[in-house]
Amino acid sequence: MSGRFAPSPTGALHLGNLRTALLAWLAARSTGREFIIRMEDLDRVQAAPEHERGQLADLAAIGLDWDGDVIRQSERFDIYRDALATLDARGLVYECFCSRREVRAEIEAAPNAPHLPPGSYPGTCRTLTTARRDALLADGRTPALRLRASTSMDDGPELIAFDDIVAGHHEGGVDDVVLRRNDGVPAYNLAVVIDDAMQGVTQVVRGDDLLDSTPRQIHLQRLLQLSTPEYGHVPLVFGPDGERLSKRHGSVSLDGLAADGVSPAAVLTELLESCGVEHSRADASRQLSDVARRFDLAGITPGVAVFETAPSTPAGFVLRNAG
């Protein structure tokens, strides 16, 4: 049994990433699970070894450890292809020639069906004729591969319900999600399902921006006869402008804060306090194992945390709960 943290090594971890990693670590350790790190490095342009090294150093700096070797998705393409072939053999895969711009236009013209997450694919290429497919190929289009999530679009979406440790009961529909991009790279939703199953992940703690994707992943798990972990989707960190935390909000990474004289221990203390986690301010990093013994993921402070600079505080910032 294990929990995990699975960042994309495309840059430095910001405070929101570190907060999620900390909660995932506490949730795993508090329930006797191993804690593993997986690098979701499917972005061939921005993912880089130096980003991976920096992220691992940042996790260690705030006192997080992990079990076993770090797994990289870029080294597992053959495994994803095998799973894709299994779905294709059952008639559950079809080619999609739509560009992102075309999908956006289709969605704007015809809003999503009820229960489907925002931006769900409307099924444009589900019933392409052979003549139309040949014409698109002749025009130089390279197709992505999508899941045929339901027998017919007229049947409505497959509905998946689950109980989330943090968000509570949730129900959502499954659209025809991409399984392989048109550049041949396996898509996130397929890769994450395969990896969680093969790595024995029984608990997934991640940002609540992925809550609406969870029904898609549970559906894929069932199709591939894989086990479903328990999920805990935790609130994100936003800037004071209401946008997700990023470099434009100032010093939001350990390196940036260190340049301002802020220690990793001070950052850890603020991260713990923002979650409503009981701890001692004296030396939070040394007491993380004690914190884990008392930790309950279901009891964390609800609502988003808002980053605000506060030069007079030890961390140089506060994460204010917005309710």
Image: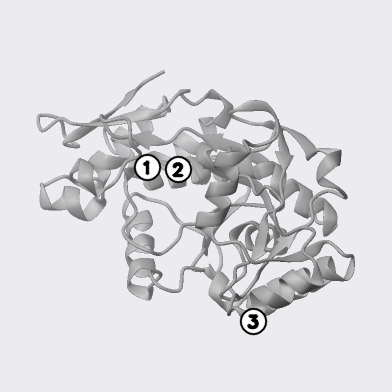
Helix, strand or loop status at disc 2: helix
Helix, strand or loop status at disc 1: helix
Q: Are marks 3 and 1 in contact (CB under 8 Å)?
A: no
Marks 2 and 3 sit apart, C-alpha to C-alpha, by 46 Å
Residue 138 numbered tag: 3
Tell me which label, 3 or 1, sits earlier in the chain.
1
Tell me which label, 2 or 3, sits earlier in the chain.
2
In front of the other: label 2 or label 3? 3
- The percent position of residue 144, horizontal first and vertical second, equals 64, 68
Q: Are marks 1 and 2 in contact (CB under 8 Å)?
A: yes
Helix, strand or loop status at disc 3: helix
Mark 2, residues whose alpha carbon is within 10 Å: few (<14), some, or many (≥20)? many
- Circle 2 is placed at which residue position? 20
Residue 16 numbered tag: 1
In this view of the protein, which residue sits in the foreground, 22 or 72? Answer: 72
Identity of the amino acid at label 3? Ala
| 286 lies left or right of 111 | left
Marks 1 and 2 sit apart, C-alpha to C-alpha, by 6 Å
Marks 3 and 1 sit apart, C-alpha to C-alpha, by 45 Å
- The percent position of residue 68, horizontal first and vertical second, equals 56, 67
Identity of the amino acid at label 1? Gly
- The percent position of residue 63, horizontal first and vertical second, equals 37, 50
Identity of the amino acid at label 2? Thr
In this view of the protein, which residue sits in the foreground, 143 or 296? Answer: 143
- The quadrant of the picture occupied by the C terminus is top left
Mark 1, residues whose alpha carbon is within 10 Å: few (<14), some, or many (≥20)? many
